[in-house]
Amino acid sequence: MKLKELEQLKNEGVDHISSIERRRFLKLGFLVTGVYLGGKALSLAPLTEAQAAEVVPPKGKYSYSPHYSMVIRERLCINCELCVEACNGTNDVPSYGYRTDILERRRAIVDDKYETIFMPVLCNHCNRPPCVRVCPTTATWKDETTGIVKMNPGRCIGCKTCMTACPYNARYFKEEGRFVDKCNFCYDTLLSKGAKETACVTACPADVRVFGDLADTNSRVYELLHTPETLVWVLRPKTGALPNVYYTNA
Amino acid sequence: MNGVMDSILPRTGGLEPSTAKGINVALMFFGIFTLVGIGFGVHSLVVGHEHTFGVSREVPWGALIAAYVFFVVTSTGLCIVSSVGHVFGIENFEPIAKRAVYMSIVTIVAGFIVIAFEIENTWRMPVGNVVGANLSSNIWWMGTLYGAYLVFMIGEFILLQKDSHKKAAYFGLAGLISGIAAHSNLGAVFGLLNGRPFWHGPYMPIYFIASAALSGCVTIIFCTYIAHKVNKWQMSYDQEKAMQSVAKMAALTIAILIFFTIWKVIAGVAGHPPGKVLAMEALLNGPYSINFWVGEIAFGMLIPFIIILAVRAKNMGALFIASFCAILGIFAMRYDLVILGQVIPHYYGMDMVDYPTLFSYKPTLHELMVAASGLTFCLFFLFLGEKLFRGHVTESH
Amino acid sequence: MKRIAIIFIILAFLVPAVCLVAADTDENEYDEDLYGPEAPIIWEKPVRGVIFSHKRHTMEFGLDCDECHDEIFEMEAGAAEEYDDFNMEAMYDGKYCGACHDGDYAFAASSRCTTCHIGVRGVERLTGKSDDKNH
């Protein structure tokens, strides 16, 4: 093709293509080249923001609606394990497994004594969930609306990579059904049926576990995480998983 | 079909396979053992891994993942070694290349067999991998690339048998690229887990490729020697030369691995990096210290290195012993690598009560039988291959 | 031979002596009539895993029996558990443990939960039942 002919060609006009169409086309191109993947997994702009922030996302920067999260008022936990029982009963958890557990820490205090701290643990429904990234078949994924990390049992090949990837030991292999099971904030058993809180939250007699929508500034979880002179932390923050289960001394 | 087979299977030429009874007995034994091992695997699949395997919630990957890694590392290594001659045209390596290509196919299939019994629901893979393809998952890439790798290597082998070396070289290159990509992704399966301090970092993919080269070198020495010994073939001058070259390459890769290992240890100890130092302690001075010092260091590195240097890579019998030691040591390396990454408790360093300082794992009979059947599978097809392909001799042009 | 004999003789004297001393201190250490039952009380209601130790309160802190018995607590094992108001709310109102644990005389019942609430784990450790869930 000669240059002159080229010049005479009528512009097909990218500006006539609708932006949705253009976006679709670009997305396809990105998918093919893997840029899309790189953008999702490696993009630096949102990352610096997330790393610079405290463990709690800054106001207004919630990725989900409702942005489900749980606040654990750790010092109140008395290890009665009513939460564990409620969870097992609600979610058909077998005797060899658990979705939530109570761990125990010990800290030396004055007068040569020590104090016991019970630490409830469950799936952190991370904003950057390592289990989701490693799953070869997307049998586990982060729900786009609620942010809950869910499982599709029929898709699970049982490679258990999600179990090794999870920094929190939140997953176990369920023999019945042959898939990796985990906490889903009681989504299928309670939340989707209109309940406002999870089984463990309802069962707790000491008001240790508080559940709600972090994006709602009137919610109790929001309030607890933004109370003056309190401490808020997450477990193993250095793994970069950005948990949605927060611990506080409030 | 017959026509294709005819063009691949040589009727004449090459080396006359021995018809000694012993070989057939060995073949039978390896074949039956493989079937028995697969029987153990099927049993586990039916009754559930939790009843037959030693893996747990805390240590979900056991001896079979180690065996899988071992086999695919060996396969990638054999592909690398074969490509030195076939793809990059270094003539010294030509005589071992055909056998290396053949064994790389055998070992990758052995790896697939082992992983098929390690994964709980293998049957969900074909659909799940396509419908649910996750491009950010290293496991997905590894599986897909190794699938392509297998196709390329089989293609290369068929073309080699048909004596179309130029086309074979293209397939060899494609196999090499996909193999290295797949294998470094296997390293990344471990290395990109931020929550596992012993694995985390770029070290894993790099180390995997380096150790693959060693695996390939020693495995081809082992196989070539044993094939000649069993069939009572005289090793040709070119073949011996090739063995010497491979042995020198093995010595070089051992040196590289020693260097890698020294820095891995120092990096794991200096400044007590949280979590990592626990694994390093277990490796150097704890429950895994025998594996490390005897298996990895003595058998995997020092003994073969010293033997190869002592005989100046010239004595075939000595090279065989060196390669055998190295293979044992490499298995210990795979085992330690897979298990140690998982035994550091998730909530280490938090003053936990009634919480183990290290998780534990012990392989069960079922796991060992499936892993061993992978080995006998390789030996079965090694001997069968020598019979069918008459010593994998490359005709000179 | 001689040396071995000497060692034996020394041992023959030493062992009973050590035993005697040990038995002596044991006996002197705790008197149930004076201090109340030595075995800790473990409450299951209204929640599991709460401990009360007589030894702690009497021998170590020097309280007399009648400071609690029979006004705050009946002197019968498990009696308090049967009352409907045996709960934290009541204690905050100064009943049961709350009589002393008011934040003044002793730490408040609304604080330092795990001092008394040793939990399922604590009870299992105390009764020797191992928790093999995590191991």
Image: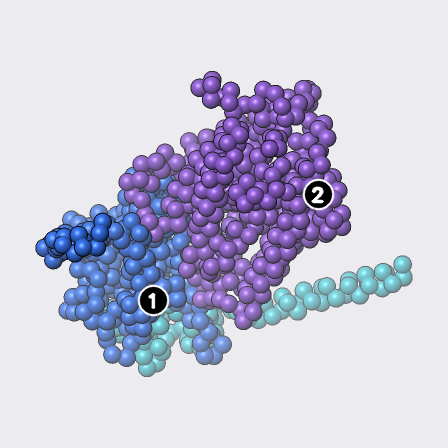
Chain colours: A blue, B purple, C cyan
Up/down of C8 relative to A225, above or below: above
Identify the residue shown where x is 61% and y is 60%.
B259
Q: Which chain does the residue under circle 2 lie in? A: B
Measured as percent of width and height from the top left, residue B373 is found at 55, 33
Up/down of B72 relative to C26, above or below: above
> Looking at this rendering, what residue extends furthest in the bottom direction?
C104
Identify the residue shown where x is 31% and y is 70%.
A48
Quarter of the image with the N terminus of chain C is bottom right
Badge 1 marks a residue whose secondary structure is: loop
Q: Report the Cα–Cα distance between label 2 and label 1.
A: 55 Å
Task: Give the amino acid at mark 2.
Answer: Leu
Q: Nearer the viewer, mark 2 or mark 1?
A: 2
Measured as percent of width and height from the top left, residue B282 is found at 57, 58
Identify the residue shown where x is 28% and y is 40%.
B131
Task: Give the amino acid at mark 1.
Answer: Val
The quarter of the displayed image where residue B372 is located:
top right
* Viewer-nearest residue: C80 or A17: A17
Q: Is residue B128 left or right of residue B224?
A: left
From this viewpoint, is residue B183 visible? no
- Mark 1 residue crowding within 10 angstroms, few (<14) / some (14–19) / many (20+): some
Residue B319: image tag: 2
Q: Which chain does the residue under circle 1 lie in? A: A
Up/down of A132 relative to B18, above or below: below
Same chain shared by disc 2 and disc 1: no
Measured as percent of width and height from the top left, residue B86 is found at 55, 40
> Looking at this rendering, what residue extends furthest in the right direction?
C2
* Viewer-nearest residue: A40 or B199: A40
Residue on which the image places disc 1: A234
| Total numbered badges shown on the rendered structure | 2
Badge 2 marks a residue whose secondary structure is: helix
